Image (cartoon, helix red, strand yellow):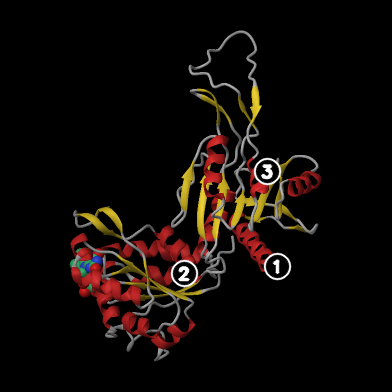
Amino acid sequence: MRSVIAEKNIVLGVCGGIAAYKSVELLRLLIKDSASVRVMMTQNARRFVGPVTFEALSGNPVCSDLFNSRDKSAMKHIRWAETADAVVIAPATANMIGKIAGGIGDDALSTFVLAVTSPVLVCPSMNSNMYQSAAVQRNLGILKNDGFFIIEPGSGELACKTVGPGRLPDPPYILDRLIRCISPKDLTGNRILVTAGPTREPVDPVRFISNPSSGKMGFAVARAAEHRGAEVILITGPSSLPDLPNVRTIRVNTAREMADAVFAHLESSRIIIKTAAVSDYRPSRKSEKKIKKGEDALILHLEPTQDILTEIGKRKKNQIIVGFAAETDDLEKNAIDKLMRKHLDMIAANRIGWNDSGFESDTNQVTLFYKDGAKESIPIMEKGELAHLILDRITKIMQG
Ligand SMILES: Cc1cc2nc3c(=O)[nH]c(=O)nc-3n(C[C@H](O)[C@H](O)[C@H](O)COP(=O)(O)O)c2cc1C
């Protein structure tokens, strides 16, 4: 997927902490997302990891010294600061946090930070007592007030064998927060309700009726909306995907549980995006005991579940409602019918039965139908990219 961070100029600052090795992985992830990265290491960071790895991965010389470097531009702390789209300091030592808070510029990284005007994400990592010390907490407070973005360190057993807060979060999480820092915040002030995944309708204690929905599309929409400043509630059926940062995730099993959760949050949501593949039928009776295998055919009596989207359409106020339709036949006719009948603003119709689209796949190919009759065929793309495209279309609808 073309990430928000692709082609962006990122400066990665690395300080002399035990977690400096993790910044190599962070750099690799940034490069994988096609960011253009330059690395600044403190002199002490070089005692923990060598610059060669950073140079090889980034394709750029590492800067550690303002006055003597292979990069010949004498004012590189200013040039790098002027061209940076974002800066991430990981790990940020107690020492560097103190220097930034105090406005000190006595080395390349701290001097560079003074000149930066783009977002700076600071990722503290240190021994728990150091992290909880009055000085570090006071300095972090100053940084927050000054507009720096701070990632809370994780808790657990640290390299120094103490247990508590201070661990540098995993690089994919840092990357996710960095992407959020530089994403446009065009959905700020909007609460978005997203549904995802399948539902499971129990037959007996060990069996259920379900479908292969992975939740990937809904999680991608929730993630993209959170990056764009929305307050996101994600209601998901069983999915192996982990909770997303800063997204309130409610995990349910059955269609009934999903309906209850959706209706509890419906009124307070401005935008509702329903990607969940909710079961249309459930066994009318769940056997309390496991049904034993027998010689005869087993007949299950199924009853319809509540149509959540129809009910949302009925209760619709000043809201934008977007549905998804997965169809094997008559895609267009069925999608338009669903759009009109359920009072949706837009429906994303995807044909299923193809490996690279629909359930479980990382990519999706949809056609968008709008309530004014417009139709838009979208080429196949990563679900993350499609999520942003759908949010772009929603913001257009909101602008009228
Ligand atoms: C083995 C070792 C591990 C260290 N780990 C950390 C750490 O995780 N976080 C931290 O803030 N300081 C840590 N320090 C202390 C810093 O290296 C020290 O404060 C140094 O002055 C930081 O320099 P810098 O901020 O210019 O990189 C560690 C020191 C040693 C010797």
First reached walking from the N terminus: tag 3 or tag 2: 2
Q: Amino acid at mark 2?
A: Cys
Q: How packed is label 2: few (under 14 Cα within 10 Å), some, or many (20 or more)?
A: many
In the image, ligand 1 is in what quadrant? Answer: bottom left
- For label 2, the residue is 181
> Helix, strand or loop at disc 2?
helix
Residue 114 in the image: above or below residue 129 = below
From this view, report whether residue 353 is shown above or below residue 58.
above
Mark 1 lies within 8 Å of ligand 1 (Cβ measured): no
- Asked whether disc 3 touches disc 2, contact meaning CB atoms under 8 Å apart, the reply is no
State the CA–CA distance, disc 3 to disc 2: 37 Å
Residue placed at 45% from the left, 48% from the top?
242
The residue that label 3 is drawn on is 310
Q: Name the residue: 69% across, 55% down.
A: 380
Question: Where is residue 213 shown, x and y percent of the image?
Answer: 59, 41
Question: Residue drawn at (33%, 85%), measured in percent from left and top?
Answer: 111
